[in-house]
Amino acid sequence: MVTDAIKTPRRDGGDRGKTVHRISPSVLIVACPGALSQSLGTFLMVVHRVSTIILTCDAAAAVEAVEQRCPSLAIVETGMGDGMGIEALQCIRAIAPHTPILALAQDRAQIEQAEALGADVVLMEGVRPDVLRATIHTLLHDTATGKDGATCLLGHRLSKLTFSKVES
């Protein structure tokens, strides 16, 4: 994990404030290469100050990334061809049971599959940006890294939350 050093200013305007170190999260994105994965990566870096984005497009690469990098959050596009997204979600949950998983589904069947496989939150692709931002914020900031390096949710899990695309 990468840490950011943040210098907090003194109340009187001086520069001898306290230095606070915080852990910068890393996020695994399992999605088809293209606009969704690139846009999501940029969104995470800019809005959520994510230091490391790991992009993969299949279950085997996702497993390798989780084993080597221990991401703070996994985002899985469940609608990838040949069931690859669902397989990736299942593998991630099996090897990293405490890693929060956000599944992006295309239809009701994928929502049900993702929920059954243990996704912490399932959102429909095309969800409003403010809902996506709030969901990712909650998943990233309600986590802490334990002594063994495993990520676990503090207090509660966001189980079975599902948001659908809102037509305007």
Image (cartoon, grey):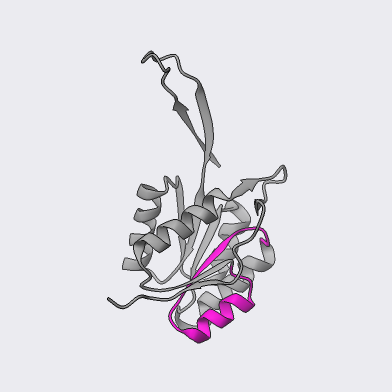
* Residue that appears at 34% across and 54% down: 42
- Image position of 136 with respect to 34: above or below: above
At x 51% / y 47%, what residue is drawn? 25
The stretch drawn in magenta includes residue 102: yes
Asked where in the image residue 166 lies, by quadrant, the reply is: bottom left
- Taking 39 as reference, is 86 above or below it? below
- Which residue reaches farthest bottom? 109
Q: Position of residue 27 (x, y in %)?
A: 49, 55
Q: Is residue 48 left or right of residue 142?
A: left
34 left or right, relative to 1: left
Give the residues in magenta. Answer: 96-119
Give the residue furthest to the right. 148
Q: Nearer the viewer, residue 66 or 106?
A: 106
> From the viewer's perspective, is 117 left or right of 127?
right
Up-down relation of residue 103 to residue 70 (above or below): below
Q: Nearer the viewer, residue 51 or 128?
A: 128
Count of numbered circles in the view: 0
Residue 34 visible in this rendered orientation of the protein:
no
Position of residue 79 measured from the top left corner of the image (x, y, whole percent): 45, 79
Q: Quadrant of the C terminus?
A: bottom left
Residue drawn at point x = 41 percent, y = 21 percent:
9
**Residue 38 in magenta stretch:** no
Q: Nearer the viewer, residue 74 or 153?
A: 153
At x 62%, y 46%, the residue is 144
Q: Position of residue 72 (x, y in %)?
A: 56, 52
- Where is residue 130 drawn, in percent x and y? 37, 60
Figure quadrant of the N terminus: top right
Residue 81 visible from this viewpoint: yes
